[in-house]
Amino acid sequence: MTKYSALDLFSGAGGFSLGAQMAGIDVVGSIELDRFASETYEANFPNVLHRQKSIADCSSSWLKRHFSGVDLVIGGPPCQGFSVAGPAQYGIKDERNGLILEMARVIGTIKPKFAVLENVRGILAGRLSRGDSALAAYIESLKSLGYSSTIFDLNAADFGTPQLRRRIFVVSSTDEALLPSYIPTDFGEGKQSWVRSIDALSDLPSLGPGEGNDELIVYPKAPESLYQKKIRRGSRGVVNHLAMKHTPRIVARLAEIAVGGSMRDVAPEHGQRMRNTGEIDAGQRYKMNCTRINPEMPSLALPANFQTIHVHPYENRMLTAREGARIQGFPDSFVFKGPRTLMSKKLLIREGRENEIGLSQYNQIGNAVPPLLARGLLRAL
């Protein structure tokens, strides 16, 4: 069988690249601006030519020199500007939205047979800074280069990922006849075939707040599901399994949250406190804050800040980075680098600590393309 090659743009930690490798594709290059995500990528893909830079700074001559002849370009441009949880909800057009046209420029430069763009569903209504449709502009740019495109709306749970995560994929090709009409799954669609959260997490070491280790922890028990058997291949244990520290007040709050419940359901005395006064904040509570995962279902989608969103199914703490990685479909042998968590970018700038800005382990995991979803799509190509 022909071995196809791929270039991964906006590669992040490497979820799309990993899925491509699982599909039998040779990933030959990757480009990612963030330094911590690049550190993770280089640790897990040592044989891939990786560059830590913006694709906007990649000249046509450099791209042609290194990647002419590549069969496939894949990429997930920054999605914050399109996300319903991002600036789009306030009518703000994020300047990063225009990066999808940089992806089109790269495609036009090296002219692969296929290209696949991944993004949140908000991209369907996303706008460029000048106000026109971002997705339409991208597809039209590729059309002018001789590409036909098809849009797929896929759920990661249908591809064996223990997470209800819907994403948009734009598949483009220089040969319209090669575009798939649908993407088959190995599992079939629907609840009867989904991997449950408990199938992903039950064999991991139990932790209290602040417990665990960023280094290797040997498995305490045998795998308890087929998913765990697959995810553990090639590893003696888990890394990045360190629980966040919680105050007794936070632990008491989490103990009040039942499966499927959230911050909105706790008694007033367990609510948030107002800054500087310590008094109970009687204002609006958000249903997504501190949501306890249902062990009998796939997890809700992991955002980049899932360390403050998802509560462990049974333990009164938030998820560890490794638990998030399990829910995204990363194998235990995949190591995440960089800080586990980081202060907000605005706060770091205000304090003159710009050198600390980057994507934490949680950010890298939440931003990633689920590898099993990527594998299923790319196998169809």
Image: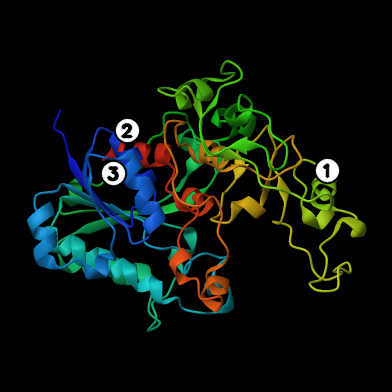
Tell me if mark 3 has few (under 14), some (14-19) or many (20+) residues whose alpha carbon lies within 10 angstroms of its own. some
Contact between marks 2 and 1 (CB within 8 A): the answer is: no
Of residues 92 and 377, the one drawn nearer to the viewer in this rendering: 92
- Indicate which label's residue lies in the foreground, 3 or 1: 1
Contact between marks 3 and 1 (CB within 8 A): the answer is: no
Image quadrant in which you'd find residue 105 = bottom left
- Indicate which label's residue lies in the foreground, 2 or 1: 1
Tell me if mark 2 has few (under 14), some (14-19) or many (20+) residues whose alpha carbon lies within 10 angstroms of its own. some
> Which of the colour schemes (rainbow, by chain, secondary structure, one colour) is used?
rainbow
For mark 2, give the secondary structure.
Answer: helix
For mark 1, give the secondary structure.
Answer: helix
User: Where residue 148 sits in the image (x, y, percent)?
Assistant: 22, 58
Quadrant of image for the N terminus: top left
Residue sitting at 64 percent across and 43 percent down?
319
**Residue 377 visible to the viewer:** no
Which residue reaches farthest top?
A: 222
Q: Is residue 56 left or right of residue 307?
A: left
Quadrant of image for the C terminus: top left
Q: Is residue 318 above or below residue 329?
A: below
Q: Is residue 250 left or right of residue 354?
A: right
Residue 22 disc label: 2
Of residues 374 and 202, the one drawn nearer to the viewer in this rendering: 202
The amino acid type of the residue labelled 2 equals Met
